[in-house]
Each structure stands twice: as C-alpha cells, then as structure tokens.
Image (cartoon, helix red, strand yellow):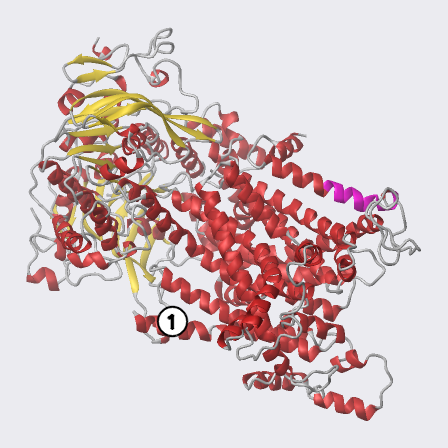
Amino acid sequence: MARGLGQYILIRALMIIPTILILYTLVFFFLRILPGNPVMAVVGTKNIPPEQLEHLMEMAGLNKPLYVQYFDYLKGILHGDFGVTLAFPMGKPVWDYISQRFPATLELAIWAFTVSVLLGLITGVLGATKKGTKVDTSMRLYSIIAYTLFIPWFGMMLQYVFGIHLHWLPTSGRLDPGVDLHTITGLYVLDSILTGNWEALVSSIRHLILPALTLGIVLSGAYTRLVRNNMVDVLSQDFIRSYQARGVPDRKVLWYALKNAFIPVVTLMGLQFAILLGGAVLTETTFSWPGMGTFLVDRIDYRDYNAIQGAVIFFAFFVGVISLIVDIVYAILDPRVKY
Amino acid sequence: MLLEVKNLSIYYYTLTGVVKGAEGVSFSIDRGEWVTFVGESGSGKSTVAHAIMNIVPSPGRIVSGEVVFQDRDLLKLSKEELREIRGKEISMIFQDPMTSLDPLRKVGDQVIEVMTVHGIPEEEARERAKELLEKVNLPPDRLDYYPHQLSGGQRQRISIAMAMAFNPKLLIADEPTTALDVIVQDSIMDLIEALKAEGTSIYFVTHDISLAAERSDKIAVMYAGKLVEFGTVEQILENPLHPYTKALIEAVPDLWKEGKVRAIPGYPPDLRNPPSGCRFHPRCPLAKAGLCDAEEPEFEEVEKGHYVACHFPGGWRG
Amino acid sequence: MSEPLLKVENLKKYFPVRRSILETLRKEPPRYVKAVDGVSFEIARGEVLALIGESGCGKTTAGRTILRLIEPTEGKIIFDGTEITKLSHEALRPFRRRMQIIFQDPYASLSPRMKIGDAIAHPLLVHSLAEKEEAREMALKMLKRVGLTPEDEFYDRYPHHLSGGQRQRVVIARAMILKPEFVVADEAVSMIDVSMRASILELLESFRKEYNLSQLFITHDIAVGKLIADRIAVMYLGKIVEIGPTEEVLKHPAHPYTAALIEAVPSIARRKKEKKIRITGEVPNAANVPPGCRFHPRCPFADEKCRSEEPKLIEVSHNHFVACHHPLI
Amino acid sequence: MEIAGKIAEFLFGKKPGRGMMLFGLTIVLIVLIMAIFAPWIAPYDPTQSSDDVFAPPSGEHLMGTNRLGQDMFSRIVWGSRIVLYVVFIATLISMAIGIPLGLVSGYYGGKTDRALSVVMDSIYAFPALILAIVIAVVLGPSPLNTAIAISFVYVPTYFRMVRGQTLSLKGQLFVEAAHAIGAKNREIMFKYILPNLAPTILVVFTLSVADAILTEAGLSFLGLSVTPPTPDWGYDLRVGQPFLLDGYWWLVFFPGVMIMLLAMAFALIGEALNERVSLGTR
C-alpha cells in the first residue's frame, strides 16, 4: 500500500509536466502575437540607434527563430533561468525577483487559505445542521455575498475602517518601517519565530491581518456553499441514520458526517487555490504587498514581456504543485481511490 | 408485550405539500415474535420502522402517537436514554447495504464502535467483533476491509453482525434483502431467523408478501400510510379479510402455484392528498359509494388477534 | 420447427478492466471482465425465452449485445436469416425498427425534457414511417392502446408527472409503435410496484399476440419467468448453464444451480420448505472466472473433474440442455 | 403567450428562492436601464472636469466628485455600459466556443476528446485573472479586447460542464433507448442531450456572468481595460484609492458597491435557478 502510494505520487508529479507545457506554450505564443516585438514594446517609439536595438534583441534572445526561442527558454527554466528583465532595471535575472517576491505571496496565500477553509467549514456546517431555518438562509446569503465581494473594494473598506479610521492596523507593506528582520525562508512570521525576533513577529502578523482577511473571506464563500450542500447530502444518507440507530452519540455522528462531506471539499481546494492566486494579485495591489502579484502588475506597466512570461510560468508550476498535493491528500483520505 | 405502538402518525413536510407518510398506526409485538410489514413503496411500512427508532429522516416528523417499549414510551425519552437503547436493546438493519455503512471507515472499526459506545472496553470489543463475524459466516479478516471492498451480501452480513452485538430484544429489518439476489437473500433470512431463535423479536419490512409467508409469525399489511390488516400468517394468507390483502396475494407470481396473477387496477394514491374515507376505495371492487368514500373504516379485531380496517371485511365471499 | 427469428451463436462480450496508471506503466497484461462468455440460443417467432440469473451473471449485457447497443467481442447474431453482427451502423438501422428493447428503470429510460407523446412518436420520424401529424395521431392511438387515457392529455405530459407504472407503459408504447418482431425486455417489471406488475406483463403478452412478437425476457425472478416464458435459460457467470421448456426446467432442474435458485425463491403456496440443495458463497467476480465448471466453488457435488474440465451443454431430455458433469436427472 | 406565461411562472412562481430571484432581477433591470438611458439619467458629462473637486455626496452631486471634479454619479451611470458590454460579449464568445466543443467532444470521446480535455483542464486550473491579465496586456486596453481576454478564460468552464454532463447523459438509459430506436448521432445530441443540458447551462451562465463581472472589474482596476477618461467602475476604484487616506471614501465606495451589486444579482439569480432546476427533475 505504502509503495503504491509512493509510486502514485511520483506518477502524479510527472503529470504536472503537460499542464505546465500547455500553459507555457499558450503564454509564449500569446506574448509573441503582438505586432512588433517585446523590445519594441518597451522602448516604444523612442528613436534608438539600430546597434543598441540589436543588442537588446540579442539580450532578450529575440533574434533567433521562434521555435529556437521556444526551446531555449524551456531549457533555461529547467536550470532555474527565467530570462532577464527587459525594462527598468534592464538585464536583471527574472528569477531573482521571483525568489524574493514569491515567499511574500506564499505567506499571504497560506493565511488567506486557512481563513477561508475555517470560515467555510464553520458557516457550512452551521447551515447544514440548521437546514431550512433562518440560520441556513443567512449562511447561504453569506456564501453568495462573500463570493461576489470585489477584493479591492472590500480591502479598501477594511483599510478605511481599521486602518485610517480606527488606527488599529497597518494598511500596507509587510513590516513597520524600522523593524529589522533577518530573512531565512522569506515567510516573515516564520522567520521572526526562527530568529526569536518578537517585535518583527507582532509587526508581521499585524500587517498580515487585513490582506489575509480580505482574501480569506472572499474565498470562504465557495467553501460555505460546498460544505453545506455536501453536509446536507451526507446527513440524509443511510449510514448516518444507521450510526444513530446503533446508539453512536450525536457528536461523533456529526464528526463522521463532516469527514465524508470534507472529501469533495479537498478537490475544491485545488481549484480554489488558483482563484486565490488570482485574488492575491488584487489583494497585493490593494495592500502594496510586495509579492508576485505586485511584481506582475509592475512589469505590466513596463510592458516587460520576459518578466511577465517568467512570472506566469512560475504561477503555472506552483498551481501544478498544489494540485499534486491536493490529489495526494485526497488519496490518503478516501480509501476508495484506486492507485 | 415487548413493543406496543399506539396511534402513530408521521408526516413529511415537503416543499410541495404535507405527505401523510403514516397515520394512526397501532399494533403490538410480543417477545420472540416475528412480525412482517408488507406494503408497496410509499405505504408507510419503513416510515413506521424509522419512527420506532425515532430516526425519521427530515423533513419527516412524528406528529402523534406512542411507542411503548418495555413499558417506556421511546418518544418521551431523553436523547441519552434513547441512545442507550439504540443498538443495544433495539437494533436496526437498513435496506441498501451499499449506503448503510460509512465508506471512509473500516468495517471492523464500525462493528467495534457499536460495543464501545455502549460501554464495552475496546480490547474486549475487538475480540467479540471477530466472534460476531464468524456468527454471520464471514472470515474475521474482513474486519480490516473498507465497505467498498465487500459485496452487497457481505455488507449486509456486517450490518447483521452489528445488530447481533448485544442480543437485542428487538431487531428492525427494513427491507434488508431487497437489493440482494435470491440465494443471498435466503442466507440473510437464515441469519435473522437464527437471531430470532435466541429470543429476539423481529420487525421485518418487505414489499414481497411471499417473503413474509415463510418465516414470520404475524403479518401486517399497510396501504397508503394506513395499517389495513394485522394477524397471524395463517389468518392473513388463508383467510384475508381486506380486499387489498387478497389482491396483493393474487398479484404476486408464485413458482408453486398454477394459474394467472391478477393486477390491482389503478395506481397508489398521492399521499399529499389521500382519497377520502377508506384510502383503498378508488381501487376496491367492493367499494360502496356514500360509505367507503366518505367514512374511514375503524381498525377492529374481527377474530382473536386478527384486525382489519374495512367496511366489508371478506365481503367478496358474499 | 421453422427457421428461428433470432439465432445467437457463441456470443462473447469481454470488457477490459480499467487499469490504473501504475498498472499501465508496469505493462501488466490487460484483464477482462468476461460478462458474456460463449452464449448460444435461438428464439422462434412469437416465442418468449426467459433469461434468468443473478445480478452480474451477464444477462443484461447479453440482451444489449444482441441488439448491438454494445458491440460483441465474438460470435454471431443472426436475425431473420441475416447476420447483423458486423453490419455498419447505417446498414443496421432497418433492423433497429424490427428489434426493440424495454429497460428495467422506467425513470431513467425517458428523457426528462421530452413530452411523452413526442417520445412515442419519435421512432416513427426516425425511420421516416410517418409525417409529423400522422406520427402524432399514431402516438395518440398507441397511448390509448397501452391504457394511458385520456390520451391527448397524456401526450403533453412530461415523465416526472407519471408514476413508475405509467412510465413503463410509455416505454412499451415507444418500443411497440414500430411494430417490432423481437423485443428484449430487460427486467421490465422489477422496479414496478407489485400491484401493477401483472398489468405490465399482461400488456406485453397482448403485444405478443397482436404482433406475433418474440421476446427475450431478462429477469432475476424465476416466478415471473414461469408466468410468461415458453422456455427458460439460466445464466451463471456469463454462460448458459441450463436451457429448456419452462415446465420441464422448473419441475426437473438438471443443474444444481438452477435447483438452488428455485429453492431459494420465496413462495406463499409452499410456505414451510425443506432445503435439498444448499449452496453457499456469492457469485465470483467475472474478471476472475474459476477454472473448469464455473459453479464448482459453490457446488455441493463438485469433484476433480468439475475443477478442471468445463462441461458442455448436453441434452438431458427433449429440448432440455444442461452444462453439468453431474446433472440432477 | 403560453410560453411567456410559463417563463413568468418559472421565474416568479411561488418556489424556493423567489426572494433571491426577485432581488437579482431587479438589480439587473436597474443597471440595464442605467446603461440604456445613460444620457438621460446622468446629470453631468462623466468626462467633464470642473473646479468642484473632492466634493462629498450632496444633492448636487449624489455620489460626490473626484479629483478632477467629475460627477461620480454620472460616471457610475455611464460606467454600467462598459461592464455590461464587456461581460455580454465575453460570455457570448465563451459559450459559442465552449458549449459545442464540449458537446461534441464528450459525445464522441476518443483521442481528440482526451487531448482537448487536458488543454481545457490546464487552462481551467490556472488562475483565471492572471491569464486574463496576460491576454489583456498583449491585446491592449479596449473594452472589446477585455471581452476577448475574459472569454478566453471562461471557455473551459463551459467546455468542462457541457462535456461532463454529456458524458453522464450519454450513459443514461434514455440515450441508449434513442440508439435502440435507430436515432442518428446528430438527433441524439440535439433532441435528447442538449435539452437536458439547458437548465445547467442556464445556471452556469448566470454564475459565470457574476464571475466575469468581477474579472472585468479586476482587469480595469489594474488599468488593463479602458483608457482615461472613459468612465469605468473598476478603473475609478483604482484612481480613487490614494485619496482614501484623506477620507474621500465616496471615490471608491460607490464604484465598488455597483460592481458587487451587479455580480451579486447574477449570483442570486443563478442560485435560485439552480434550486428550481434540481427541483424540476425530481
């Protein structure tokens, strides 16, 4: 069994490759269907000497035939080379940015994810166990409202109330100015604990609260709905009544029902993570959070196609890894999964 | 008297109206007695079974009646008192063995749990679980299986093993063999009979009156939420008094009987809006206008232990 | 006996077992579920053959394969002298008119979004047997014929307005409007309430008389088989183990499995029974068929020969065949 | 007439979710009227600057004015045109591609189906907003381009839903019955499968419109949808954010509320429809 699971994980891991390839191909060709070329896009209509243009083209690898570029870049990725930036500051490895920005996004994602799942579970179970009552209706409304909250707006409202009006929490950045933190993982909360820097810990948590709540609440709506519906479904099944008929205490029965209702939620988590990353772009922009999202938006302003390409492919890889983890968790939780 | 059900009514409050799942049902079961409830889908036979355990699924509600089990009304017990009876004094087996076990837990854990929630230490329960599996003719290693790894028949055996954990006073079997093939059905019936031999009373639900014929002591016939006839096997099968009972017997194909079967004309009624008077009157050959469609017949004892709710019991005999 | 309407020879249907990614990568040989494994029989015009067996014995697959709703793996299906096994879908269409099927589940065999009248009329349009108006008229007549009156009211109803018994009448009407010569009735009454089963059976019987309709009546219930069939075939794990005239098979079962099946059927007429044959266990997985006689692991009479050698169908009495090394008669 | 009555009954009949349905339809109707009659409803020219900057909401300026002195209410009214236009075009395109592709792919199966599914799944699994950003960047800011970018990311939604449903319907008995009566594949797809898909398509349509509204707002918030001074809710939100610190809340409050109300309206309609659909087949 254990060996089977190990091999399953391996094979499932290999299956990320086509997904990333497809997205890479899509993005690669998308970014090249525009008239002119990426370098032209950056320099615009500025009159620059032909030799300098030539040099720029070479630096970006754009003077080679398309298919050579395609495979060159692919080869580069395998060595962690995501190309260089084309716009200010020019010629810096994209990977340097990614390695610096990604931990910030990951930290935000982890907290937002936790908030969303916890909120979704609580509200969903509440709705299902009080099915048909006012509580149920409110939970369903909560689900729809949370789902349709517009992240920047919701973020700004929280900034306005808790930051600007009440002065409780900071509204931008990851740390208060003047707080020093020696980074190890790039996840500030973790780093503060690892280095025993309590001032930084408090500061980083305070900075996390509003962005994580914003993103977490918006994402929780989908969980509320799914948990509620699954739970209602499971609670109406025979095995639940058969537990009751055997004298199993209600508390335990509810727990078993939750376990069953949770399995489809695991599948949703994979997809939700993708939505979470999309939402992170908006959240980071709203809260000036120095992550992958603000990096992407930054580069968009410069029309820096190499950097955009690098960032998107990295996102694809990350999404692939998450779906792998989700599948493994699923296989462990559900004995019916065959591998 | 082990179980006495008095005037039990269960309604389902659905979005499209109130379905009167069972109405005014009264009967009793003696110690060691096997009573089979026969009826078509929607007749209320399973609803009553669920009500005895007080596990009527939502949106159903018990609206009136008493379920007196060993001199205590089960419907008035506290949650904890009821929980102690469930699975220990009264056990239940469900219709669909595919859905009546938790798919995420090993069957062994589920069997053991029946005993631990009623105060038996884990270790002892594990030993007894093995014995129970042997009793239902399953190898003890099946305890380590997940439900999806077992066949329907094997799962139903697991359910019976759980029901046997405490030598219950009453076993409620809700169509336990409907999803199974005849040969497996036969062996499951043998197991239930074995349980009865140890003194357990059986409340058995089936739509197949011939299955009722073979092993039960008494038969209860239900139609459209009403108990229409109740008596010993001989009384019901050899001297049926309700026209529905008679029609039901004649509608079932029988390997050992020559001649045709006869359908009952019409369709079962919609229980949101049941027929007035006797609920069977639109399909009944004896129905008399002004009486059967207006006045509900009383459920009365016509001979010793033989009850019927009909204005013309046995009326076809002239 | 004249030329049979339907002749099935050595019909086989193997389903490949879905392999996990691991198994595919390890290049493990593909395994098959041998749902139907060499079935042969004939049905005369106007004859009803009951195909009886427990769930998983392959009876339903056999019925569908004969109609080529599932493609056979091997064997021949000869309908009215023409082999239809290898016909293209286009060439098969005229035969679709002549052979029909009635499914077990009346809830699933009608499209929820199609008026039942249109569902009945559609076969006529498919085969260009009538124009729209005419098809409607014929469908109305058919509704009346199967007892769904007032027919013009029923025509416009959707399946979810109907009870199970009524739906099965619609399904029968849809199959019968083409005036087929042969019908596969797959457990046609097992999901119908007991009180209405007899009327559905009567309806089928009336069509047999009217169209001289041959039927392959697939059922798990021998008692139903007894009621309607001229002959009975008993299937076990993809093979016919016994076939013969209904009376003969029921009174003198030659295969231990048939005998056990008969004994297990509950009955009002024979209330207290004593068991002569007791078989244990359950039908094995069709992906893992036992060697020799397939029934030997459960058979009380099994010996060495049964474990190694597969029995062939032999005639034990007139027209009564059994595949057993130790037939009971 | 009879059909109109049935539709009215379906939409407003005394069924669960009636409140949600009514609320949703009312909001959609209001926004529609705003868009159609914008020139008559808006009191000012939305792009006209004035000296009256950062005026708080008042009788004169219902939703205040921004840093250029433009009337926010007029901008909101005119902005509805952009949202509706983009979302309508985007949904139309993605349905036109996703539905037929999913139907044919699911019905016939085979290698093409598998290849197509892998591609669609890959796109589906990727953050929709980020993909839309990439496409919008390449195409340049214009409402039509935004619509194309959005439609691209929703094709897989329709494809997967239709394909999945087709697969499950294909295995249903009534489809097998259609084969048995000799119906051709085309007839089976259009007469037996498509009508049974319709309710689900309707539900997914409303939900994906809700989603697309938020995606459109996201793109314009990032400055990828319109060029100034075109009035657009998402863009106004972005431009107003820096002034939140000074307490000018109305610059962001109203555009955001509109985005959400419209998205919520469609989500509520979808939820109500979903309930009706699952009720109808029971």
Secondary structure of the residue carrying numbered label 1? helix
For the N terminus of chain C, the image quarter is top left
Front in this rendered view, residue C208 or D269: D269
Residue A142 percent location from the top left of the image: 57, 46
Front in this rendered view, residue C281 or B140: B140
Residue at horizontal 91 percent and vertical 56 percent from the top? D49
Residue at horizontal 33 percent and vertical 18 percent from the top? B280
Residue reaching furthest to the bottom: A51
Within 10 Å of the Cα at label 1, are there few (<14), some (14-19), or many (20+) other Cα atoms?
Answer: many
In this picture, is C216 found above or below B243?
Answer: below
Which chain is indicated by disc 1? A
Q: Main secondary structure of the magenta part?
A: helix
Residue at horizontal 39 percent and vertical 14 percent from the top? B276
Residue B192 percent location from the top left of the image: 15, 39
Residue B293 percent location from the top left of the image: 37, 11
Q: Amino acid at mark 1?
A: Tyr
Residue bearing the label numbered 1 = A8
In this picture, is A293 found above or below C117?
Answer: below
Residue reaching furthest to the top: B290
| Residue D100 visible, this angle | no
Residue reaching furthest to the right: D51
Which stretch is magenta? D29-40
Q: Identify the image quadrant of residue B188.
A: top left
Front in this rendered view, residue C119 or A209: A209
Q: Identify the image quadrant of residue D220.
A: bottom right
In this picture, is B318 found above or below D57?
Answer: above
| Residue B98 visible, this angle | yes
Residue D39 painted magenta: yes
